[in-house]
Amino acid sequence: MAERAQELTIGQVAARTGLSVDALRLYEREGLLVDAVRRDASGRRVYREWEVEWLLNCTKFRASGMPLATIRRFAALVRSGPGNEADRLALLREHQEQVIARIAELTDCLGLITGKVAAYEEHVARGAARDPWTGNVPSAGDAAVAGRS
């Protein structure tokens, strides 16, 4: 009976993970879970707590840009049991490097955006109808250029 108390329905898992019921079924079909989803006597999917934790990891992997194929490979390695930890580590390190590179790229983008926000805040605070970059008052012929960033 203790095992039964730990079983969660697909709706409960969806609520806990933020994944839709359809996404949970997709994860199952795509082989992203470590174990096959068990069914109760009525044939409904039931999940255990550790499966919810695995799904939460998967959502973070996806949020970090890890492709479904890579998650599938990682799940297959976990599924096959001990002895392939070096392969798991290599997979995670490769993704870690990709995430670090993406963070650097986004940090650079954020710097540009932050600079633009500061420039436009200053321009709006001045209340001047001047080009925020040149300080010139735009003429009617400058309308096409007015859309500059």
Image (tube, helix red, strand yellow):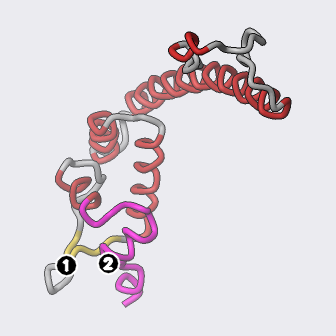
Quarter of the figure with residue 67? top left
Figure check: 34 above or below 122: below
Left or right placement of residue 52 versus residue 110 in this view: left
Please give the residue where the numbered disc 1 appears in the rendered image.
Answer: 44
For the point 32% across and 63% down, the residue is: 20
Range of the magenta residues?
A: 1-22
Quarter residue 69 falls in: top left
Which residue lies most toward the right here? Answer: 126
The residue at the point 85 percent across, 29 percent down is 126
Of residue 86 and residue 23, the one placed in the foreground of this image is 23
Marks 2 and 1: in contact by CB < 8 Å?
yes
Helix, strand or loop at label 1? It is loop
Of residues 102 and 58, the one drawn nearer to the viewer in this rendering: 102
Q: Residue at x 37, y 82 (%)?
A: 3
Q: Is residue 14 left or right of residue 31?
A: right
Q: Main secondary structure of the magenta part?
A: helix
Residue bearing the label numbered 2: 9
Q: Position of residue 36 (x, y in %)?
A: 22, 60
Q: Is residue 49 magenta?
A: no
* Label 2 CA crowd tier, 10 Å (few <14, some 14–19, many 20+): some
Q: Is residue 12 left or right of residue 31?
A: right
Image height check: is 49 above or below 78? below
Whether residue 22 is situated above or below residue 84 in the rendered picture: below
Q: Is residue 13 above or below residue 143?
A: below
Tally of marks: 2
* Residue count near mark 1 (Cα–Cα under 10 Å), binned few <14, some 14–19, many ≥20: few
**Mark 2 secondary-structure assignment:** strand
Which of the image's four quarters has the C terminus? top right
Closer to us: 136 or 21: 136
Q: Amino acid at mark 2?
A: Thr
Farthest bottom residue in view: 1
Q: Measuring from the top left, give residue 79's x and y in whole percent.
A: 29, 47
